[in-house]
């Protein structure tokens, strides 16, 4: 077991049911997980085993039917919508398979959006931080480029920078390299893990890619709603 102070995330005995009546399915069956700061944890397993459902719970986008979720030692699993929304903005960064950039905005504006929502920095500070993050992912020359004018690999690198915008303690990534070729997959994974380790952030990622899973600090195989 990891020391509590070193954990960005701890969940215990999570159960989640989806559907109703005869169609009710027991998707997660008592899942427990710890994510230490500065480490990358991969969740692997076949489609339909519960990986994405778990990630939604950990990201406070959904609530478990049973069990607890702690972010930075703060119990969040039974919090109301407002508290969960606030915690997501402050403590969690998301990277999805599809980058979900606002295509009509520049790369800089996309990275600044989570900062605007959190409202802790001045416009000048937000712009400076966005520029630093885009430089860190190799796009410092393209801060004013519209997202539509970037390649797929570049768009996903902007999504990584955006996930790091508010200096979250936990980064959740759902197939973050699933749409990329081998070269860009390796580049995005390297960037995400290097930046997270540099800043003591925990990364939990769902992946089907065995090469990426093998490079993570912790690998948790999942089958039929439980870790095996």
Image (cartoon, grey):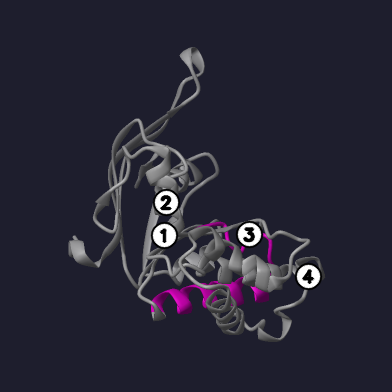
Q: Which residue is mark 4?
A: 146
Q: Which residue is mark 2?
A: 86
Task: In the rendered structure, find residue 178 and report the number of the disc placed on it.
Answer: 3
Q: CA distance from mark 2 to mark 1?
A: 6 Å
Magenta range: 173-197
Which residue does the image show at 40% across and 81% down from the upper left? 198
Q: Earlier in the sequence, mark 3 or mark 4?
A: 4
Q: Residues within 10 Å of mark 4 (few under 14, many from 20)?
A: some
Q: CA distance from mark 3 to mark 1?
A: 26 Å
Q: Is residue 186 magenta?
A: yes
- In the image shown, does 45 or 11 lie closer to the viewer? 11
Task: In the rendered structure, find residue 90 and report the number of the disc placed on it.
Answer: 1
Q: Where is residue 70 shown, x and y percent of the image?
A: 28, 50
Which residue does the image show at 39% across and 77% down from the upper left? 199
Q: CA distance from mark 2 to mark 4?
A: 29 Å
Q: Earlier in the sequence, mark 3 or mark 1?
A: 1
């Amino acid at each position: 077991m990891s020391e509590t102070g070193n954990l960005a995330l701890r969940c215990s005995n999570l159960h989640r049911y989806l559907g109703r009546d005869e169609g009710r399915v027991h998707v997660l069956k008592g899942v427990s997980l710890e994510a230490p700061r500065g480490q990358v944890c991969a969740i692997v397993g076949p489609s339909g085993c519960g990986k994405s459902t778990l990630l939604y719970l950990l990201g406070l986008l959904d609530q478990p039917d049973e069990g607890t979720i702690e972010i930075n030692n703060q119990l969040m699993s039974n919090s109301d919508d407002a508290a969960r929304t606030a915690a997501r903005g402050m403590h969690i960064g998301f990277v999805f398979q599809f980058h979900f950039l606002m295509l009509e905005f520049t790369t800089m504006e996309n990275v600044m959006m989570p900062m605007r929502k959190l409202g802790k920095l001045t416009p000048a500070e937000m712009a400076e931080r966005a520029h630093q993050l885009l430089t860190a992912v190799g796009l410092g020359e393209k801060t004013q480029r519209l997202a539509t004018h970037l390649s797929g690999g570049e768009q996903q690198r902007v999504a990584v920078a955006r996930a790091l915008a508010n200096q979250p303690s936990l980064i959740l990534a759902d197939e973050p390299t699933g749409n990329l070729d081998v070269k860009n997959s390796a580049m995005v994974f390297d960037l995400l893990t290097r930046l997270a380790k540099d800043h003591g952030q925990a990364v939990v990622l769902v992946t089907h890619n065995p090469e990426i899973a093998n490079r993570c600090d912790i690998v948790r195989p999942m089958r039929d709603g439980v870790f095996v």
